[in-house]
Amino acid sequence: MAHVLGYDATLELVSAAIDEAGDGGPAIAAAVHALKQQMPAYTWVGVYLLDGNELVLGPFVGKPSPHARIPLGRGICGAAATEKTTIIVDDVNADSRYLACSIETRSEIVVPIMLGTEVLGEIDIDSDRLAAFGQDDKTLLESIAQRLAPHLKAADRTEPM
Ligand code: SME
């Protein structure tokens, strides 16, 4: 799908933004902003942080979400964290797990952020296009999730974002 740079260049750019931002929350916010800027199909980009049995919304770019806290058993977000795997939904209106954030949203990808086998949080992205996310997006976002994992640990040790 059309975007400003190729996927490899986007990964480099987002990784550089993470490295420049420092530790913890600022690194997460930098990644979210850089991704939103580079990828026009990414309408809403955010990171949820796992807090006990709930996912808590951290840095995001896009419309405010009514889902600031999502129990692990709910939504596509809860499913991705529980199953410890990336979930791509081509048509959110056809998925009974979907928790709506905006009525324009048509597709979604949720990528767990893990250290080893431990889930620390996840990257959640919505698009206003049907089936906006493919294998290239999954690969890109899983690489970014790996780079973000140490920063979620750091964010844990400091103040809430
Ligand atoms: N759609 C998500 C909820 C989060 S909002 O999209 C920001 C879900 O179904 O879990």
Image (tube, helix red, strand yellow):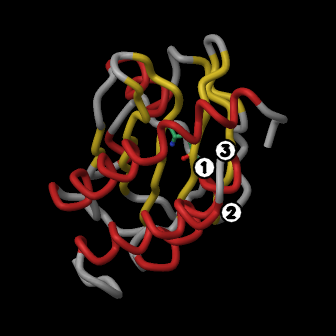
Residue behind mark 3: 24
| Residue located at (72% from left, 37% from top) | 68
Residue behind mark 2: 63
Q: Secondary structure at mark 2?
A: loop
Q: Amino acid at mark 1?
A: Cys
Q: Which mark is residue 101?
A: 1
Task: Give residue 131's position: percent from left, percent from top.
Answer: 25, 60
| Residue located at (40% from left, 58% from top) | 106
Q: Amino acid at mark 2?
A: Lys
- Taking the view exactly as shown, the residue that stands out farthest to the bottom is 4
Ligand 1 contact, mark 1 (Cβ < 8 Å): yes
Q: Amino acid at mark 3?
A: Gly
Q: Earlier in the sequence, mark 3 or mark 1?
A: 3
| Residue located at (61% from left, 64% from top) | 30
* In the image: residue 73, left or right of residue 6: right
Q: Quadrant of residue 11?
A: bottom left
Task: Give residue 46's position: percent from left, percent from top.
Answer: 57, 52
Task: Give residue 39's position: percent from left, percent from top.
Answer: 40, 75
Ligand 1 contact, mark 2 (Cβ < 8 Å): no
Q: Secondary structure at mark 1?
A: loop
Q: Secondary structure at mark 3?
A: loop
Labels 3, 1: front one: 3
